[in-house]
Image (spheres, coloured by chain):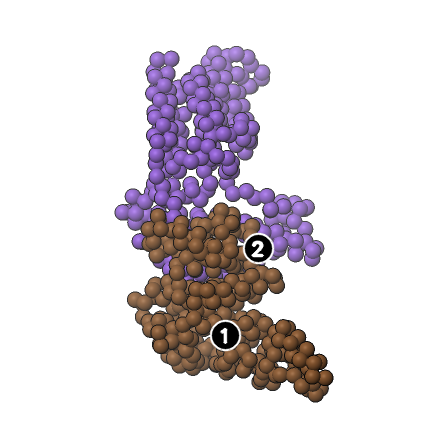
Chain colours: A brown, B purple
């Protein structure tokens, strides 16, 4: 268990030969049970990394190891995809079947799981994302957030060790985003599933246990959300913004209010302001 | 305007016919079609009519549903009837009006062929009304899977049909959205000559196709991520199993066959 769950070693990737590198010498070790947010501006290479994690793309140079297995080796492809599931951005384009239950079954059918074992796995996966009562509905009638939770259930039924969510909330409304993020956090907390959460929403990244920042194909920052977001100036250089409360605290500090620099949430801000008021 | 696209004509009620194995339903429908072609005279349709009535009763299908299935065929039916009636061969004239003449044989054929058409459609719509399209696809896949031996892509065909069914509502919704966006910019889809209207569809179809291709790329990636690698070694959530009710249905069809053959010979 000491070894990294997902390990990127000097990873480079170019879409075509001679094209500029979309991912440029990235090294990153993700431990088992971590919730890592991969942040980056458009075109920073974060989605390319997602597709390198389960062998959809193979590295131009360098290595990706999932539980010690090299994604470049064809013999590992299916085992890696079984262990490291992936949820994509567009909820409509990843649902295969016309009934929710059958869509969740899709991965199990592909793995050749015996039919009589499927219903239990499917119910379990749907329960884990709070969608059991929708099992017999048609997916096109569900909301975006519900569709994404179905996509997560489809992965979960295969009992993966890691889930990569590639901007899974980018096309959702605020409540849908909240639903999907809470689901991923809960799976990480309760089932110990390693989560790689790719996003450009700062307030989502603030909930992760670790934040990695990509800029123009390179990994430029890596640390806890507090460490990362307290560096407001640096973050801005990478064409990103800090979470709203961190920004507020930075603005107040500029005017001489004695607040902490690493405030992430509204609750922390409230606490801090109360403490300040108490002192005064 | 595209919102009311329904998938097939499935009529969702609970009945023994709904629960039948789709494979048996497909085979029996084929048998029924053969049976209808074996009927030799208009009188021979009496047992066929009784059988259709019995089946639709067992399937809980109201008469209205059954008659509605004939609606798309009404023009063909009128043609069949009129052409046979007025331009049929034969010599025993009933009456004559200018160059049009109606013969006994013509009248006989008109009734015979119209009834044949009506029962063919009614019989097969019992299958489509009681089986969801996806189940039908499953049945079809299972039935043609022996042809895999001669490299017939049975699984791929079924997968394509399932995905097509899945994406019809999604693409219909998108077409609707594009149409509204174009209309808001002054496009006119509803008036003008046929040629003009066909031309007006181009700005609708181009973005629709572009998006369909993008969706196909996304879906392929999502399917691969979920370990899809063709039909080899794949299991199924729903295992098709023929039971007693399927046997009963098959026996009843055999009965119909016997009656129709006997009538063709002796009546």
Q: Quadrant of the N terminus of chain A?
A: bottom left
Q: Nearer the viewer, residue B157 or A241?
A: A241
- Distance Cα–Cα, label 1 vs label 2: 28 Å
What is the quadrant of residue B116 in the picture? top left
Rendered view: A146 above or below B263: below
Q: Secondary structure at mark 1?
A: loop
Rendered view: B254 above or below A111: above
As drawn, the label of residue A112 is none
Rendered view: B130 above or below B50: below
- Give the chain letter at badge 1: A
- Give the chain letter at badge 2: A
- Can residue A110 be seen from the camera position used here? yes
Residue name at image x 70 percent, y 81 percent: A278
Q: Nearer the viewer, residue B9 or B151?
A: B9
Badge nearest the viewer, 1 or 2: 1
Categorize mark 1 by other alpha carbons within 10 Å: few (<14), some (14-19), many (20+): some
Q: Quadrant of the C terminus of chain A?
A: bottom right
Residue B75 spot, x, y in % from top left = 55, 30
> Does label 1 or label 2 sit earlier along the sequence?
2
Categorize mark 2 by other alpha carbons within 10 Å: few (<14), some (14-19), many (20+): some
In the rendered structure, the answer to whether residue A104 lies left or right of residue B146 reads right
Residue name at image x 38 percent, y 68 percent: A55
Residue A126 spot, x, y in % from top left = 47, 54
> What is the total number of numbered labels drawn onto the structure image?
2
Residue A97 spot, x, y in % from top left = 46, 51
Residue A229 spot, x, y in % from top left = 57, 80
What is the quadrant of residue B44 in the picture? top left
Q: Which residue is mark 2?
A: A143
- Can residue B216 be seen from the camera position used here? no
Q: Which residue is mark 1?
A: A209
Residue name at image x 71 percent, y 86 percent: A255
């Amino acid at each position: 268990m000491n070894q990294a769950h997902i390990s990127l070693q000097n990873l480079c990737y170019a879409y075509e030969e001679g094209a500029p590198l979309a991912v440029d010498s990235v090294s990153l070790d993700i431990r088992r049970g971590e919730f890592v947010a991969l942040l980056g501006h458009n075109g920073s290479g974060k989605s390319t990394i997602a597709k390198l994690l389960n062998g959809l793309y193979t590295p131009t140079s360098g290595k990706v190891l999932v539980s010690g297995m090299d994604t470049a080796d064809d013999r590992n492809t299916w085992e890696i995809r079984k262990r490291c599931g992936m949820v994509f951005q567009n909820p409509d384009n990843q649902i295969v079947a016309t009934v929710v239950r059958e869509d969740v079954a899709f991965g199990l059918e592909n793995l050749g799981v015996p039919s009589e074992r499927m219903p239990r796995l499917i119910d379990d996966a749907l329960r884990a994302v709070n969608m059991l009562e929708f099992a017999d509905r048609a997916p096109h009638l569900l909301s975006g957030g519900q569709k994404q939770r179905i996509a997560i259930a489809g992965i979960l039924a295969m009992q993966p060790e890691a889930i990569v969510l590639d901007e899974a909330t980018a096309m959702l409304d605020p409540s849908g985003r909240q639903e999907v993020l809470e689901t991923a956090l809960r799976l990480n907390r309760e089932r110990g599933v390693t989560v790689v959460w790719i996003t450009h929403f700062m307030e989502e990244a603030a909930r992760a246990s670790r934040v990695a920042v990509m800029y123009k194909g390179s990994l430029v920052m890596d640390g806890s959300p507090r460490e990362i977001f307290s560096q407001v100036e640096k973050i801005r250089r990478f064409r990103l913004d800090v979470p709203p409360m961190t920004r507020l605290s930075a603005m107040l500090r500029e005017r001489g209010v004695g607040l902490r620099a690493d405030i992430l949430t509204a609750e922390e801000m409230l606490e801090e302001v109360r403490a300040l008021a108490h002192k005064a | 305007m595209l919102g009311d696209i329904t998938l097939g004509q499935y009529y969702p009620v609970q009945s023994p016919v709904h629960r039948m194995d789709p494979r048996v339903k497909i085979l029996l429908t084929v048998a029924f079609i053969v049976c209808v072609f074996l009927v030799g005279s208009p009188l021979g349709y009496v047992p066929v009519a009784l059988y259709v009535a019995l089946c639709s009763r067992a399937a809980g299908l109201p008469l209205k549903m059954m008659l509605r299935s004939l609606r798309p065929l009404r023009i063909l039916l009128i043609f069949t009837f009129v052409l046979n009636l007025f331009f049929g061969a034969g010599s025993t004239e009933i009456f004559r009006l200018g160059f049009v003449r109606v013969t006994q044989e013509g009248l006989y054929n008109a009734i015979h062929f119209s009834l044949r058409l009506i029962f063919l459609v009614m019989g097969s719509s019992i299958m489509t009304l009681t089986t969801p399209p996806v189940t039908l696809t499953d049945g079809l896949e299972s039935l043609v899977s022996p042809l895999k031996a001669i490299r017939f892509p049975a699984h791929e065909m079924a997968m394509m049909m399932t995905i097509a069914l899945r994406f019809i509502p999604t693409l219909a919704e998108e077409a609707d959205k594009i149409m509204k966006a174009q209309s808001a910019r002054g496009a006119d889809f509803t008036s003008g000559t046929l040629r003009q209207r066909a031309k007006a569809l181009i700005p609708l179809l181009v973005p629709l196709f572009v998006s369909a291709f993008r969706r196909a790329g996304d879906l392929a990636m999502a399917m691969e991520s979920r370990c899809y690698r063709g039909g080899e070694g794949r299991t199924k959530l729903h295992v098709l199993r023929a039971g007693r009710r399927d046997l009963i249905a098959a026996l009843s069809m055999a009965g119909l066959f016997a009656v129709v053959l006997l009538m063709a010979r002796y009546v």
